[in-house]
Image (cartoon, helix red, strand yellow):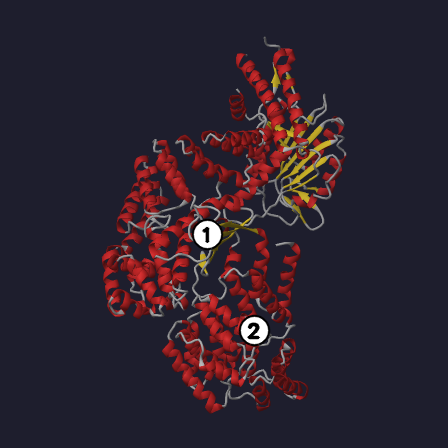
């Protein structure tokens, strides 16, 4: 990003606190105590009679004696700064009015200042602990963050007052988000009855009704027509259903709806923002930029808009590398566009290209689906840039995200942890490309994740099944969900860590399916989803049993597959704690005994805090190097990938004359630390001794791309690789570059004398 | 035949005129805590050893560290240098330790009273040497970037401003650079100021990145005049015989020709450039081989 661009969006952040520009979405207040004079204006506004409504509100703003009404009028006119000032004055006059604080809170929600809003809702509840609109305000904020707490607030509000229309709308939204369409319809029907009996605005109900229809596959909903009859410029009739397309990953359809929303209501800034974010997800960058800029002009309060604009600006620092089958026969599928940061594109390109290509070949064959478009793969060195990509999506993974033909993830340089295996993450995301596109994005979250996790374990770059310890504990505590409810574990988790538990359960579920019905069952399931089946139907049709029967079978599978491990978890923890304690005390014999017992209890656990590395260390301390190496080899063979441990293992294997194995270990290590120039040098040097110059060349090219301090050495190594490949011209070129930098470089001088002879 | 009287250190302190000398002043300031005191003293010692190796002796190396590095001692050392060095000489000053900056004044923390940035600037200004390398590796050292800049002086600071106040890592890497073949990017057995700066800067950045930490220091350089100066020799290029002297002179002529050619690179066709470069490099390799063989015969 250049400095002008950075300044532009930094300046935007400052403006956020200024309450300067109007927001144009309709804001409904459903409480019965809304003043009648405001209701009269509202009616005009809800019917799309904008000018009349504005005149009505303007009159109240000027002549209204009550600052609470003046605040509402200013808000409806889009003058948020004036509304805020009026609310401040009103609080002085009516400090004990809970409605006033709740409404002021809603104004803060409108300007994306949720924390301030929450404070006001809480203040309202301090005045009146039963004040339902304040509870619903809190519920709304929680729901926007996909927090489970939202439902509790709604339930509490309804307990005191079952006629709260907004509560039913919130329930309906949450039910729609988790795919509980019948529950959603029931809530909406209750809301509709209340709206009719209380003469409250029904437009939002219509929009949610249309959303329910959409999720049932009905795209020309009668509710859309009804809403437009009432208010032809009610953009949310399209924008609200679009939200449900977005969270079910149907971005292309969401874009179509959002375009319609801004067509009928050009000043619906939120729709422009959503449009921009989602156009970016399908790689339509210029259009995304245009809509986001429009959104920003109308709503400078949104961090999401500003951050996404900044992200687009930062794409100037990236390089698009286009690899198409027509240009290179080795490229599979419809090709790829790698969007890599300029600082690391040279070094990462060959590895990313190979992995994407391998995954396309593998998955095309396994799923019988040919990709129709090139896959765009974005790797972000700044995790915050990647995080912008996932904004507003519930339960999205921390490492990568797939929007169909576009994959975005952290670059290896975007994470400082020593065990981020970028290759596995990319493999996982590439599987999503297939499951999403094969079903036109109709695959449910759990199955798409399950297939991706399963493919990680079985065909990915790391061997073995990797289940975090907290997930094993959740399994032991029977926290796995029934298959029909598994999506809710991703979208609206009810306890810390449930999203990861759901990932792993989905992976295990796919493993169960594969073991019992074979891999072709995945294809059959995908076909069912493509035809619009829900999960119970897909299971029934593809696997021939009910969801309940499936759950029982899965339970038995888990017992058979993990029963011993789950039974041993307590023992594992005890032994690991004992082992580390003994190590702290320098009692390595005891540490070894405990670590060995822990490995026996849960042999497949090689992630954080595993017992293998402790066991290897204990062997070393007890001067048992062969056993230490054997332990590290076991760890590696199970997919352990701690960078330090694998470097140690590689060197020990090499010392024992097992260079080919050592090379394999270092090759795996590139999946963790591809930007480590020493690793590339070591691997390249070893490959050269094995006369594998083509592979060595790739490593040496990576070294040069990393802009090492020892440029001369990097060129000299390239010269030696080209020499082994009998490419005399390239050899001479790099040799001269090496000597140009370091004329006294003895080895290079020697080679020069040899070739000149 | 050995020729004891013909021992000449040739060329490698390249930018220094014939007969000119190089002087080093190394100050390891107040540590405060034992761990800092120990590391500052060790870094200062390591730099002094590099300087002694470079000069093949220690008479022009002044090391002040620990309790002896007081304000009076440092001031006295600089005053002595001002009185003894010649215009054609080169002075290298390395400051290690804690520094502070209160928004107006930089201070080098020393046992007893500190030495402030203005006083140091005056003392440096009094040094007659036209070529000066001052490396201030203390915390907050960036505060002196403007105040200490001068013609003929290359000034390096461990931090970009006085606001970077954490204890620095730069000194450790600078000391390593002056003794490390890894820093010798052109493999000529000598470390230039530029090579040392590049090496140390990169290592500092790597150390933060490797630990997953945001860097709390960013080194800066002001003044390019002495960047090519060989601040340390890894091995002296010494002629012990007439034959070696001739060969080393040939080597230096070739080095000069290669430098000239490299300077014309942008104006030349790449193939022609490489062809000419190859010829010179071949000659240089042959001379180098003769030198190596002559040394092996000694």
Q: In the image, residue A258 lies at what x, y percent?
A: 52, 71
Q: In the image, residue A575 lies at what x, y percent?
A: 29, 50
Q: In the image, residue A559 lies at what x, y percent?
A: 24, 59
Which element is circle 2 on?
Answer: helix
Q: In the picture, which quadrant includes the N terminus of chain A?
A: bottom right
Which element is circle 1 on?
Answer: loop
Provide the residue designation for mark 1. Answer: A335
Closer to the eye: label 1 or 2: 1
Depicted B22 relative to depicted B172: above or below = above
Q: In the image, residue A717 lies at what x, y percent?
A: 50, 32
Depicted A671 relative to depicted A395: above or below = above
Which numbered tag is attached to residue A262?
A: 2
Q: Pick whichever of labels 1 and 2 is earlier in the sequence.
A: 2
Query: Viewed as shown, does residue A248 lie left or right of A308?
Result: left
Q: Residue at x 67, y 26 (%)?
A: B14
Query: Viewed as shown, does residue A450 lie left or right of A120?
Result: left
Closest to the observer: B249 or A428? A428
């Amino acid at each position: 990003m250049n400095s002008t661009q950075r300044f532009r969006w930094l300046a935007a952040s400052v403006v956020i606190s200024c309450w300067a520009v109007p927001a144009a979405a309709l804001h409904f207040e459903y409480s019965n105590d809304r003043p009648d004079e405001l209701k009269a204006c509202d009616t005009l506004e809800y019917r799309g009679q904008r000018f009349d409504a504005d005149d009505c509100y303007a009159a109240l703003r000027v002549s209204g004696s009550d600052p609470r009404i003046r605040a509402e009028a200013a808000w409806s006119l889009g003058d948020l700064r004036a509304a805020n000032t009026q609310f401040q004055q009103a609080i002085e006059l009516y400090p004990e009015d809970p409605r006033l604080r709740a409404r002021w809170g809603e104004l803060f929600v409108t300007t994306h200042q949720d924390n301030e809003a929450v404070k006001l809702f809480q203040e309202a509840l301090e005045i009146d602990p039963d004040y339902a609109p304040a509870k619903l305000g809190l519920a709304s904020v929680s729901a926007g963050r996909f927090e489970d707490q939202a439902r509790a607030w709604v339930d509490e509000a309804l307990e005191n007052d079952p006629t709260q229309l907004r509560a039913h709308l919130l329930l309906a939204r949450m039910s729609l988000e988790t795919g509980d369409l019948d529950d959603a319809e029931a809530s909406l029907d209750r809301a509709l009855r209340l709206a009719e009996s209380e003469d409250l605005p029904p437009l939002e109900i219509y929009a949610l009704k249309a959303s329910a229809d959409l999720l049932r596959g009905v795209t020309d909903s009668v509710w859309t027509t009804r809403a437009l009859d009432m208010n032809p410029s009610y953009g949310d009739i399209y924008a609200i259903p679009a939200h449900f397309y977005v969270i079910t990953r149907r971005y292309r359809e969401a874009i179509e709806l959002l375009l319609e929303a801004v067509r009928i209501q050009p000043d619906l800034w939120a729709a422009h923002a959503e449009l921009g974010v989602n156009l970016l997800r399908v790689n339509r960058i210029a259009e995304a930029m245009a809509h986001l800029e429009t959104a920003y002009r109308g709503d400078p309060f949104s961090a999401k808009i500003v951050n996404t604009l900044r992200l687009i600006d930062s794409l100037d620092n990236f390089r698009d590398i286009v690899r198409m089958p027509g240009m290179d026969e080795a490229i599979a599928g419809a090709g790829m566009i790698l969007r890599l940061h300029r600082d690391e594109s040279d070094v990462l390109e060959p590895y990313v290209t190979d992995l994407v290509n391998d995954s396309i070949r593998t998955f095309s064959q396994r799923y019988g689906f040919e990709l129709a478009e090139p896959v765009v793969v974005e790797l972000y060195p700044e995790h915050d840039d990647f995080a912008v990509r996932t904004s507003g999506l519930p339960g999205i993974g921390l490492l990568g995200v797939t929007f169909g033909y576009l994959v975005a993830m952290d670059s290896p340089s975007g994470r400082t942890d020593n065990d981020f295996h970028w290759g596995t993450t990319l493999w996982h995301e590439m599987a999503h490309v297939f499951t999403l596109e094969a079903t036109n994005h109709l695959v449910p979250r759990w199955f798409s994740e399950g297939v991706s996790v399963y493919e990680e374990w079985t065909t990915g770059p790391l061997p073995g099944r990797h289940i975090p310890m907290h997930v094993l504990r959740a399994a032991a505590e029977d926290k796995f969900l029934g298959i029909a409810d598994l999506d809710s574990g991703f979208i609206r988790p009810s306890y810390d860590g449930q999203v990861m538990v759901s990932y792993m359960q989905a992976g295990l579920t796919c493993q169960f399916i594969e073991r019992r019905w074979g891999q072709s069952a995945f294809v059959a399931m995908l076909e069912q989803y493509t035809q619009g089946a829900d999960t119970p139907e897909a299971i029934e049709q593809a696997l021939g049993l009910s969801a309940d029967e499936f759950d029982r079978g899965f339970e038995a599978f888990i017992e058979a597959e993990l029963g011993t491990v789950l039974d041993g978890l307590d023992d594992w923890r005890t032994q690991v704690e004992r082992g580390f304690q003994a190590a702290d005390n320098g009692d390595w014999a005891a540490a070894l005994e405990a670590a060995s017992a822990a490995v026996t209890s849960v042999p497949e656990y090689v992630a954080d805090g595993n017992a293998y590395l402790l066991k290897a260390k204990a062997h070393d301390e007890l001067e048992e190097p062969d056993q230490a190496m054997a332990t590290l080899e076991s760890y590696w063979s199970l997919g352990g990938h701690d960078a330090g441990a694998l470097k140690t293992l590689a060197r020990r294997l090499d010392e024992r004359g097992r260079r080919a194995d050592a090379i394999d270990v270092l090759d795996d290590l590139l999946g963790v630390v591809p930007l480590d120039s020493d690793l590339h040098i070591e691997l390249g040097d070893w490959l050269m001794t094995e006369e594998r110059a083509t592979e060595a060349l790739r490593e040496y090219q990576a070294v040069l791309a990393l802009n090492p301090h020892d440029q001369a050495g990097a060129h000299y190594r390239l010269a030696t690789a080209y020499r082994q490949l009998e490419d005399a011209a390239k050899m001479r070129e790099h040799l001269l570059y090496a000597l140009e930098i370091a004329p006294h470089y003895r080895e290079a001088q020697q080679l020069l004398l040899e070739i000149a002879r | 035949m050995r020729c004891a009287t013909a021992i000449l250190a040739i060329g490698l302190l390249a930018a220094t005129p014939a007969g000119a000398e190089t002087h080093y002043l190394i100050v390891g300031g107040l540590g405060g805590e034992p761990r800092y005191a120990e590391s500052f003293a060790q870094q200062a010692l390591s730099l002094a050893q590099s300087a002694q190796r470079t000069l093949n002796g220690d008479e022009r190396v002044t090391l002040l560290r620990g309790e002896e590095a007081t304000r009076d001692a440092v001031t006295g050392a600089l005053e002595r240098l001002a009185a003894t060095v010649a215009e054609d000489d080169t002075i290298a000053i390395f400051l290690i330790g804690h520094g502070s900056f209160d928004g107006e004044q930089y201070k080098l923390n020393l046992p007893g009273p500190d030495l402030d940035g203005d006083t140091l600037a005056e003392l440096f200004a009094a040094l007659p040497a036209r070529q000066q390398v001052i490396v201030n590796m203390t915390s907050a050292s960036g505060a002196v970037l403007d105040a200490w800049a001068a013609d003929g002086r290359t000034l390096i600071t461990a931090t970009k401003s006085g606001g970077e106040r954490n204890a620095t890592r730069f000194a450790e890497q600078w000391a390593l650079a002056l003794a490390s073949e890894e820093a010798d990017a052109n493999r000529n057995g000598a470390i230039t100021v530029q090579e040392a700066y590049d090496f140390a800067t990169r290592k500092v950045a790597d150390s933060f990145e490797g630990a997953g930490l945001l860097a709390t220091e960013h080194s800066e350089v002001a003044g390019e005049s002495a960047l090519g100066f060989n601040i340390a020799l890894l091995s002296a290029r010494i002629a012990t015989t007439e034959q070696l002297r001739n060969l080393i002179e040939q080597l230096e002529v070739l080095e000069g020709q290669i430098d000239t050619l490299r300077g014309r690179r942008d104006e030349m066709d790449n193939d022609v450039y490489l062809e000419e470069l190859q010829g010179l490099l071949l000659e240089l390799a042959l001379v180098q081989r003769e030198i190596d063989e002559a040394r092996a015969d000694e």
